[in-house]
Image: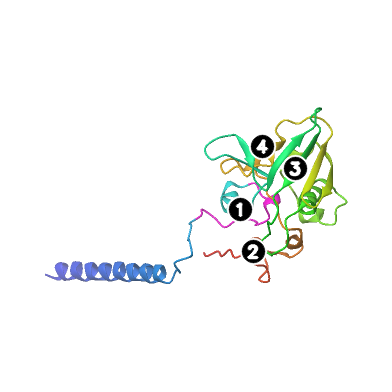
Amino acid sequence: MIHRKGMAKRLAAGLTAALVAGLSAFAAEAQIPEDVLVVGQVAEPKSLDPATVTAVNDFRILVNVYDGLTRYADGTLRVVPGLAESWEISEDGTVYTFKLREGVTFHDGTPFNAEAVKFNFDRMLNEDHPYHDTGPFPLAFFFSAIERTEVIDEYEVALHLSEPYAPLLSNRSMEREDPLLEAPCVAPTAVGRIERTRHGSIPRADQKLSVSFTS
């Protein structure tokens, strides 16, 4: 009889614990607003600066925040326009001229234009750039063929290469499976406001990008 009473107490305690856990999970779910999507990740991102990361886990988040000049068509490896609506390649294959989409703004409200594209390349490739110290940039070698960037007008930018480099357009794509092909554009005004915390590099509260992490 004593044995049965002990079993009953343990069973009751287990059912109570399961009920409390279930109610807690239900309460947490009920507090999530209808316009918020919660996605579970294996770990927190090391950084929200896409030029400084290599982990697949990080890129799974960043591809939903940033865009590149080009991208792959869904389900294919065909390069199609992204932030660049069109492009031309010189006959010798050393100059890529991109016509950019107009009316695009970054999360902080600043305009996307040719100067922003130049900033993104120069920050990675030019050691004398004032924001080169926001690196290191582990994937910059994919763009080492670029000798210089040229702003032609507000929505047109040219990349001058030291020699023909066929994968350039792919390296400017926001490929969702292979992080080595990620090369999104970030707002020049936001780079200087990135704060390093124990979570990595995340925007300060005065930025308009809303990304939350929970343990």
In this rendering, is residue 99 above or below 5? above
Circle 3: element type: strand
Circle 4: element type: helix
- Marks 2 and 3: CB-CB under 8 Å? no
Colour basis: rainbow
Q: Earlier in the sequence, mark 2 or mark 3?
A: 3
Q: For the residue carrying disc 4, how many other residues have a C-alpha within 10 Å: few (<14), some (14-19), or many (20+)? A: many
Q: CA distance from mark 1 to mark 2?
A: 18 Å
In this rendering, is residue 71 above or below 202? above
- Marks 1 and 2: CB-CB under 8 Å? no
Q: Earlier in the sequence, mark 1 or mark 3?
A: 1
User: Which of the two marks, 4 or 3, is nearer to us in this view?
Assistant: 3
Q: CA distance from mark 2 to mark 3?
A: 38 Å
User: Which of the two marks, 1 or 2, is nearer to us in this view?
Assistant: 1
Q: Give the residue number, with chain letter if any, for mark 3.
A: 98
Q: CA distance from mark 2 to mark 4?
A: 33 Å
- Marks 4 and 1: CB-CB under 8 Å? no
Q: Which mark is residue 170?
A: 4
User: What's the residue type where badge 2 is placed?
Assistant: Arg
**Residue at the image point whose x is 69% and y is 65% from the top:** 108
Q: For the residue carrying disc 3, how many other residues have a C-alpha within 10 Å: few (<14), some (14-19), or many (20+)? A: many
Q: Give the residue number, with chain letter if any, for mark 1.
A: 62
- Marks 2 and 4: CB-CB under 8 Å? no
Q: Quadrant of the N terminus?
A: bottom left
46 part of magenta stretch = yes
**Residue at the image point whose x is 59% and y is 65% from the top:** 210
